[in-house]
Image (cartoon, helix red, strand yellow):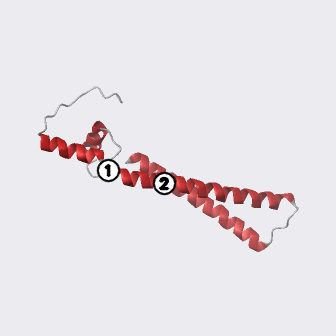
Amino acid sequence: MDDKRNHRIYCRLTSAEYGRFKTEVRKTYLSDSEYIRRKLLHPQMRIRSREETDLLNFVIGSLSQVNNNINQIARVMNALKGSGAVVIGSVAQRQLNQVEAILKEWNTFEGRLRQSLKSK
């Protein structure tokens, strides 16, 4: 498949049309060309505003921090369990299992969110 963009389309707009176009593009982080491509090739896809993109980036960053914290907790609990220095009771073992399950869910959610952000 030829992935190079060798073809150009020239279009004339009135000042009002151009103003409206630029206003819409400025609401996003997209270039003029990318905005037009997305509108043309994926008309059903809603283009995210700058605010939405910033919020999603913040959420992903926060999820990464939470993920890191949960991972550190799981690592410590596993180290304690394996060292023999501390015997983990059934309650602590259930908590470790819950932490590991939460960590797995966070990883899945974060991956889906990142993929969603890339595709729109």
Please tell me whether mark 2 or mark 1 is closer to you in this view: 2
* Identity of the residue drawn at 71% across and 65% down: 96
As helix, strand or loop, the secondary structure at mark 2 comes to helix
Query: Where does residue 78 sit, x and y in percent of width and height?
Result: 76, 59
Q: Amino acid at mark 1?
A: Ile
Residue at the right extreme? 85
Identify which residue, 71 or 49, lies in the foreground.
49
Relative horizontal placement of residue 28, taking residue 15 as reference (left or right): right
- Label 2 sits on residue: 58
Contact between marks 2 and 1 (CB within 8 A): the answer is no
Identify which residue, 114 or 54, lies in the foreground.
54
Query: Where does residue 30 sit, x and y in percent of width and height?
Result: 33, 42
Q: How many marks?
A: 2
Q: Earlier in the sequence, mark 2 or mark 1?
A: 1
Query: Where does residue 13 sit, x and y in percent of width and height?
Result: 13, 38
Query: Where does residue 38 sit, x and y in percent of width and height?
Result: 29, 43
As helix, strand or loop, the secondary structure at mark 1 comes to loop
Residue at the left extreme? 14
Q: Quadrant of residue 40?
A: top left
Relative horizontal placement of residue 57, taking residue 95 as reference (left or right): left
Q: Amino acid at mark 2?
A: Phe
* Identity of the residue drawn at 25% across and 49% down: 43
* Identity of the residue drawn at 29% across and 42% down: 35
Position of residue 117 relative to residue 11, above or below, is: below
* Identity of the residue drawn at 40% across and 47% down: 119
Neighbour tally class for label 1: few under 14, some 14-19, many 20 plus, Cα within 10 Å: many
Residue at the top extreme? 6
Distance from label 2 to label 1 (Cα)? 18 Å
**Which disc, if any, is residue 66?**
none
- Label 1 sits on residue: 47
Locate the N terminus and report the quarter of the image it occupies.
Answer: top left
